[in-house]
Image (cartoon, rainbow, N blue to C red):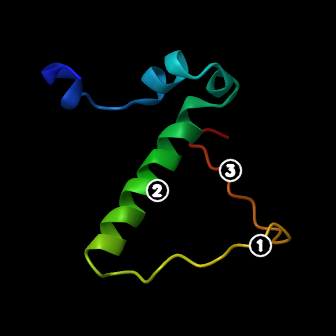
Amino acid sequence: MKKLEKNKIITPASLKSENQFLKEVDSLALSNAQLNVKRSFYEFLSKEAKFPRFKSKKNNVKSYTTNCE
C-alpha cells in the first residue's frame, strides 16, 4: 500500500468504480449508509452505545434512506 493510499478518503464514487453493483444504488443512499456506520462505530467505541443486537428480516422497517424525494 502506498503512503498516499493510506490517507485516502473513501467516497461513494470511489466505491462505485471498484464495485460495479453499486452503480445501481443512489449515491446519497451510499453516503448516508457511510455516515450511519461511522456514527455507530464512534458511539460504540466511546461507550455511548451497547453491543449491536440481532435484527430480524421479518421486521417491516425500511432502512433505505436518501436526501431527495
What residue appears at the point 37 percent right and 63 percent down from the top-left corner? 41
Check disc 2 and give the amino acid type.
Answer: Asn
In percent of width and height, residue 10 lies at 36, 32
Q: Secondary structure at mark 1?
A: loop
Q: Which residue is mark 3?
A: 64
The Cα–Cα distance between marks 3 and 1, rounded to whole angstroms, is 16 Å
Check disc 1 and give the amino acid type.
Answer: Ser
Is 58 left or right of 14, judged from the image as shown?
Answer: right
Give the foreground label among 3 and 1: 1
Where the C terminus falls, by quadrant? top right
Towards the viewer: 65 or 12 = 12
In percent of width and height, residue 25 lies at 66, 31
What residue appears at the point 76 percent right and 67 percent down from the top-left corner? 61
Q: Secondary structure at mark 2?
A: helix
Towards the viewer: 43 or 61 = 43
Check disc 3 and give the amino acid type.
Answer: Tyr
